[in-house]
Image: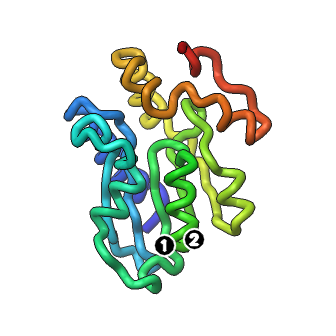
Amino acid sequence: MDDSKGLALALEEARIGYGEGGVPIGAALVAADGRVLGRGRNMRVQNGNPILHGETSCLQNAGRLPSSAYRGSTMFTTLSPCDMCTGACILYGIARVVIGENETYLGGEAYLKQRGVEVVVLGSPECKELMDKFIAEKPDVWNEDIGVEERIYSREGIKAPTGASDA
């Protein structure tokens, strides 16, 4: 599956999440042969579950799989993965992480690369616009999630964007 089609699946999940009133971050896990193993979206608001980010929700929806299923797989995500989701990708041996955008939030991309994971940032205007719209409408929900954690940026040696920490 090409990267634009994989990201479209993740973006569809993000839009569903937005419609549900949640944080609009979506993900899709695609096997090396192009089969979709799972899809998910951030469900923190909808389920009151602090660890159901887009990528972890996707992995949960993929169900119990043998480790061989992850070999050569790609995680498509609309936003740069946080430390928890970065760790999950590494734990399961996911080979590639394709990111819609990383301007709103820069997660563990450097660590993924350090651990041998291929990282591709597509710079999707649709992903950025959806996050911008959500943050403008619900800054309190964004800030309770990962929006104010400048420590992530400092690890990457990059200054947090203006407005990223309103607290």
Which label is found at residue 73? 1
Label 2 crowd (10 A; few <14 / some 14-19 / many >=20) = many
| Residue 29 location (% of width, % of height) | 40, 64
User: Which part of the image, by quadrant, shows the C terminus?
Assistant: top right
Instruction: Give the residue at x 49% y 42%.
Output: 79
> Which image quarter: residue 24?
top left
Residue at (57% x, 66% y) in the render = 90
The quarter holding residue 120 reads bottom right
Q: Does the rendering let one see residue 104? A: yes
| 30 or 59, nearer to the observer | 59
Q: Looking at the picture, which amino acid does disc 1 mark?
A: Ser
In this orientation, does residue 5 appear?
no
Q: Residue at x 21, y 32 (%)?
A: 19
Measuring from the top left, give residue 157's x and y in whole percent.
Answer: 79, 37
Precedes in sequence: disc 1 or disc 2: 1
Residue underneath mark 2: 95
Looking at the picture, tell me which residue is in the foreground, 54 or 143. Answer: 143
132 over 41 or under it: above or below: above
Q: Is residue 130 left or right of residue 72?
A: left
Give whichever of 69, 133 is nearer the camera.
69
Under mark 2, the amino acid is Ala
Mark 2, secondary structure of its residue: loop
CB-based contact (under 8 Å), mark 1 and mark 2: yes
Question: Does residue 147 sit above or below 92 in this rendering?
Answer: above
Residue at left offset 45%, top offset 83%: 67
Q: Position of residue 8 (x, y in %)?
A: 37, 51
- Tell me if 66 is positioned left or right of 158 in this view: left
**Callout 1 secondary element:** loop
